[in-house]
Image: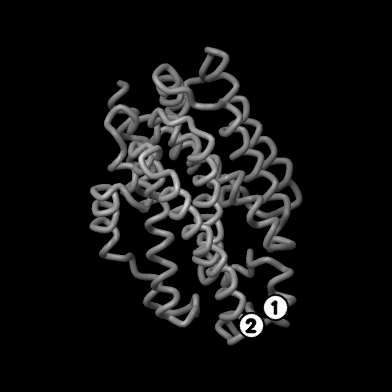
Amino acid sequence: MAAKIANSLAASVRAADFEGYLATLFAPSHARDAIFAVRAFNVEVAHVRDAVRKGDMQNVIAGQRYKFWRDLVDGVYGGRPINHPVATALSAAILDAPLSKQFLHRIISARESDFHAGSSYPSVEALEKYAEQSQSSLLYLQLEACGVQDFKVDHISSHIGKAIGLTTVIRSTPILVPERQLFLPSDLMAKHNLSSEDVFRTGPSNQLSDVVFELATLANNHIVTARAEIEEMKDKFPKVAIPALLSSVPADLYLKRLEQANFDVFNPRLRNRDWRLLYNLWNHHRRGTL
């Protein structure tokens, strides 16, 4: 039964977060099921936004669903998990790994706040805060699953989580614009004299590319900073942390492809899955680098 649940959650992650699925395959065998449990939890909580239809009761329905996940987490840590695959997997995971309850709750709170905020973030700072609370919290949990508890490594993870969050917003732009949704920071849009309506009507533009360039540069700076801090730690950096942080590789590859496309997020080539991803994940894992 445990193997069946683990395989089911891995399949759900593969379907909803293929890049995260591939990265998790390089995790140590003792940590892999726990990471898949955490990633499956993240997939389910993220899915609330898509599952709730817009309407008069959307906030109430969404609130009930986020409460369900909070109660699920509390039940797991209270020793009374409900009959749900994610609850079962998390209950098994915390027997072997010190997964912090607070990080699971932070993911829920971040997703819920994001749901109620609407489309765009008011500022780059607000977007980075959301990325820290959601993506970085996910990385902290993965590190704990691998047995890594180190303040300096957490700081590195914070930068990587922000880079992933910023990159995700950029990548989602051409997918969400047809639905009249845009998550690019309002302060950056205003700086380049660009409105959401401009993007909804015309799509690609020089102004949009300028906004994307600034956001991509910031994401890249976070990755560069993370690498520099790993280098600074030298032999003190635990190599077992690398598999937990391999999610930075897909983000880095996308940013490189985005630069080649002159920061045009609507370039059709960016929609294709990067065939080099699996090799790059393997190579970074082999070399112990990000």
Q: Relative to 169, is 112 on the left or the right? A: right
Q: Quadrant of the N terminus?
A: top left
Q: Is residue 275 above or below residue 97?
A: below
Q: Relative to 9, is 122 on the left or the right? A: right
Mark 1–mark 2 Cα distance, whole angstroms, equals 6 Å
Residue at the spot x=68%, y=41% of the render? 61
Residue 279, percent from left and from top: 23, 57
State which quadrant residue 165 falls in: bottom right
Where does label 2 land, which residue?
A: 201
Q: Are marks 1 and 2 in contact (CB under 8 Å)?
A: yes
Residue 131, percent from left and from top: 59, 51
Residue at the spot x=49%, y=51% of the render? 160
Q: Relative to 254, is 191 on the left or the right? A: right
Residue flagged by tag 1: what amino acid is it?
Glu
Q: Residue furthest top?
A: 79
Q: Is residue 247 above or below residue 258?
A: above
Residue flagged by tag 2: what amino acid is it?
Arg
Residue at the spot x=72%, y=62% of the render? 123
State which quadrant residue 71 falls in: top right
Residue at the spot x=56%, y=48% of the render? 51
Q: Is residue 285 above or below residue 119?
A: above
Q: Relative to 216, is 68 on the left or the right? A: right
Element under label 2? helix
Circle 1 crowding by C-alpha within 10 Å: few under 14, some 14–19, many from 20? few
Q: Is residue 162 above or below residue 196?
A: above
Residue 285, percent from left and from top: 28, 48
Residue 18, percent from left and from top: 36, 52
Q: Is residue 65 visible?
A: no
